[in-house]
Image (spheres, helix red, strand yellow):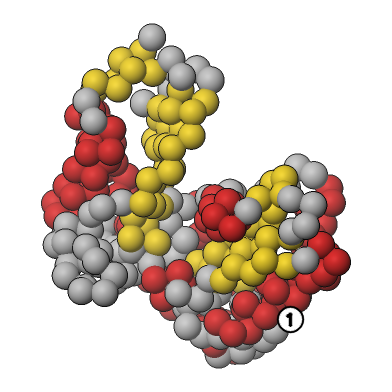
Amino acid sequence: MKEINASAITEAVARACIEANRHLPGDVACALRASREAETFPPAREMLDLLIRNEAIARETDMPICQDTGMTVVFAEVGQEVHILGNFEQAVNEGVRRGYVDGLLRKSVVADPLRRVNTKDNTPAVIHVRLTPGDALTLTVAPKGFGSENMSRLEMLTPAQGVEGVKRFVVETVRLAGANPCPPMVLGVGIGGDFERVAQLAKEALMLPLDQRHPDPYYAALEEELLTLVNATGVGPQGLGGRTTCLGLRILAGPTHIAGLPVAVNVSCHVTRHKTVTL
């Protein structure tokens, strides 16, 4: 049995909040640069140049990549042989508080959705916990801005609508989003499960590397086809047009009921941030 003190969790989450907001993951940065090289529409190329420069300045000066430093989502994979000394949820939220206060990051969370009073420290986080074999605790901290989160959608399709229905829904989501999520976007697509599980699958898909494809050839091909269809919409960087509407698209699928075909698209902007640490 491995013991992990709650204070270590707090410190790890605080560091991850700051680093995630300042440094774009390597695969996302590479996709941004590759899209710039492939873009042929001059206004789109100029906008991509600005986005690449913004990412470089943030990295070099340790400043946030975006003014919207997001609502903090934490995915925790907790080994079954791990014993946490202290309150796990309190430790995570204390880490978020320290990260956002000490890191001078914008605090964007309100305690109640209707009365709208800011908590002033970006807590509480959205926490997803999964038990895994072993004695490791892996935390993925993902600050999620709401310009893109607001464009995310979920639909309960019927099995008869099949893969064509899924394609229609994904492309429709991108067209409806337009310039609102600060494209070029990153898209996480969830297929299957039930109402709440499909939304989580879509959010988890955003954590997957953009430079890899689904291990199942069927879904790998679907990822490629959907990426082509989305980029063919012509929304382009910041809605200016061009071929670079989406930097990458990943799919996570899960078992579902015989009567259902849930699909969700979690839309993310070009600043798709996440930091993973293992204790």
**Residue furthest top as drawn:** 1
Mark 1: give few (<14), some (14-19) or many (20+) Cα within 10 Å.
Answer: some
Quick check: can you spot residue 206? no
- On the picture, is 20 further left or further right than 254? left
Can I make out residue 101 in this image? yes
Residue at image location 55% in from the left, 64% down from the top: 266
Q: Is 52 above or below relative to 11?
A: below
Secondary-structure class at tag 1: loop
Instruction: Give coordinates of residue 264: x percent, y percent.
Output: 62, 64
| Residue of label 1 | 232
User: Percent x, y for residue 11?
Assistant: 22, 36
Q: Nearer the viewer, residue 51 or 71?
A: 71
Q: Quadrant of residue 38?
A: bottom right
Q: Residue 32 at x, y = what percent?
A: 55, 66
Q: In the image, what residue occupies the spot 51% across and 76% down? A: 151
Q: Quadrant of residue 156?
A: bottom right
Q: Quadrant of the C terminus?
A: top left
Residue beneath the point at 47% across and 52% down? 25
- Left or right: 131 with respect to 201? left
Displayed quadrant of residue 62: bottom left
What percent of the width, then of the height, locates residue 227? Answer: 71, 68
Name above or below for residue 120 compared with residue 274.
Answer: below
Quadrant of the rendering where the N terminus is positioned: top left
Left or right relative to 143: residue 37: right
As shown in the figure, which amino acid type bears the numbered disc 1? Ala
Residue 112 as seen in the image, left or right of residue 173: left
Figure disc tally: 1
Q: Is 125 in front, or is 233?
A: 125
Q: Residue at x 37, y 57 (%)?
A: 143
Please state which of residues 206 and 84 is positioned toward the viewer in this rendering.
84
Q: From what the image shows, is residue 279 above or below residue 135?
A: below
